[in-house]
Image: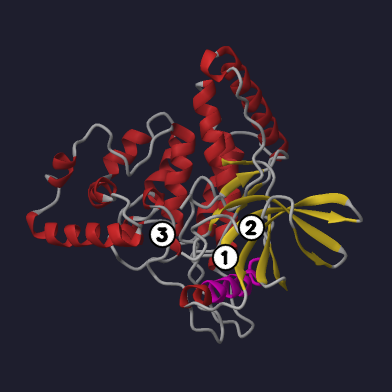
Amino acid sequence: MPYSGEPWFPQGTVLFSRSSATYELLEDLAPGHHGERVLLALRRMKGEARGKFILKVVPLPAVTTALKLARKRLEEEVALATYLRHPNIARVYGMHKAKGALYVITESVAGCSLNTLVEVALTRGKHFPESFMLYVGAQIAGALAHAHTCRSEKDEPLDIVHRAIDPTRVRVTLTGHAKLTDFGLASAHLPGRKSVRLPRARGEVYWASPEALLGQSEDARSDLFVLGIVLLEFATGKHLLSAPNMLTDELWALIPQGARDRLNGAITRAQDEWNGVDPEDTILRAATFMPEDVEQVTEKLSEPTRAIFRKLLRRNPAERYTSALALQEDLTKVLQARGSYDGTKAAQEIRRALQRAGEALAADEDGAESAFSQDDITTEPAPA
């Protein structure tokens, strides 16, 4: 990765000016998905701060093969973003060339990621209410319904698949509005373009569909499965593809003898594709979990919600929801049956949880100097 070393810019650097606004570096976050650098910047207009933005940057000219690919992938991300106009999808505002670099300007969604909210729940010893999960899930399903059904100007399907949904890429603002961020790893059939996104380039092993883990093709139903395991962990603290009470040998014992070579091949391939991460237990669990496992991890949820997870979390994609719209409709129906719930209530839940988590930390000797606050980073790339 071209930007895996030291940060390129010192903090406080004015990176560029655009439309009477200047963009000043606040923080160098880390290398991005494809070799670009990801920055958090402050936009100033007439000297006044006017919001934060995420910038993805590669140097110009792109003199190496890796940099050329990074530039093409960023250009493809911007092209894809022209179709992704939905209130529950974080915006990509375009590209800008300045001072020997190419910048992609994206929305920084102020608020908390689901990852942060899970940590808050663990700290205060209580999960968020089921209605909160249903509310956020319905909004993100709506975002996916839009992405999955986008069509070109010639009315041809774009076949967009996010492929990297995880708790860091689902964010909830302090006004209770949920957004899906970062389509930087998405696959799509963009008009007139030969994609430079490799089929194997995707998100985290722990947040992948069975078909992705087993080296099979992904489609919109893969996104729905991963959204399902994200929502399940948020609601219960349990991850379907984790079997903490089973040893690796016990998982292998569930694999038929004739399928073991194929599974070994999938594990080896995943080790290469996911940069040395050990995926063995996760892949074995993805190949062996059964409907009764879904029953067990959802046992504390209401029956209507469990029925959604039963259909959502199936190993065979053909047995899952056929569309994100159908999932959104079912989540909304269950939520409405539980009573009125909106962004105001979601915002109240977040504020109450943050306050109680802060109180819990203050009461803990090891956490007396810590406190949760809103988290402004959208893309949250993994460290190099």
Distance between the alpha carbons at the discs numbered 1 and 2 = 9 Å
Q: How many marks?
A: 3
Can residue 340 be seen in this snapshot?
Answer: no
Residue 294: image location, x then y, percent: 33, 40
Q: Is residue 109 above or below residue 216?
A: above
Q: In the picture, residue 88 is in which quadrant?
A: bottom right
Residue drawn at (37%, 67%), measured in percent from left and top? Answer: 200
Q: Is residue 101 above or below residue 297?
A: below
> The residue under label 1 is which amino acid type?
Ala
Residue drawn at (30%, 61%), measured in percent from left and top? Answer: 272
Between discs 2 and 3, the one toward the N terminus: 2
From the viewer's perspective, is 275 left or right of 253? right
SS at mark 2 in the image: loop
Residue at label 2?
89
User: Which residues fall within the magenta stretch?
Assistant: 70-84
SS at mark 1 in the image: helix
Residue drawn at (37%, 48%), measured in percent from left and top? Answer: 206
Residue drawn at (59%, 44%), measured in percent from left and top? Answer: 136
Residue at label 3?
222
Q: What secondary structure characterizes most of the magenta part?
A: helix
Q: Residues within 10 Å of mark 2 (few under 14, many from 20)?
A: many
On residue 147, which mark appears?
A: 1
Between discs 1 and 2, the one toward the N terminus: 2
Dots 3 and 1: beta carbons under 8 Å? Answer: no
Q: In the picture, residue 145 is in which quadrant?
A: bottom right
Q: Residues within 10 Å of mark 1 (few under 14, many from 20)?
A: many
Distance between the alpha carbons at the discs numbered 2 and 3 = 18 Å
Residue 93: image location, x then y, percent: 71, 66
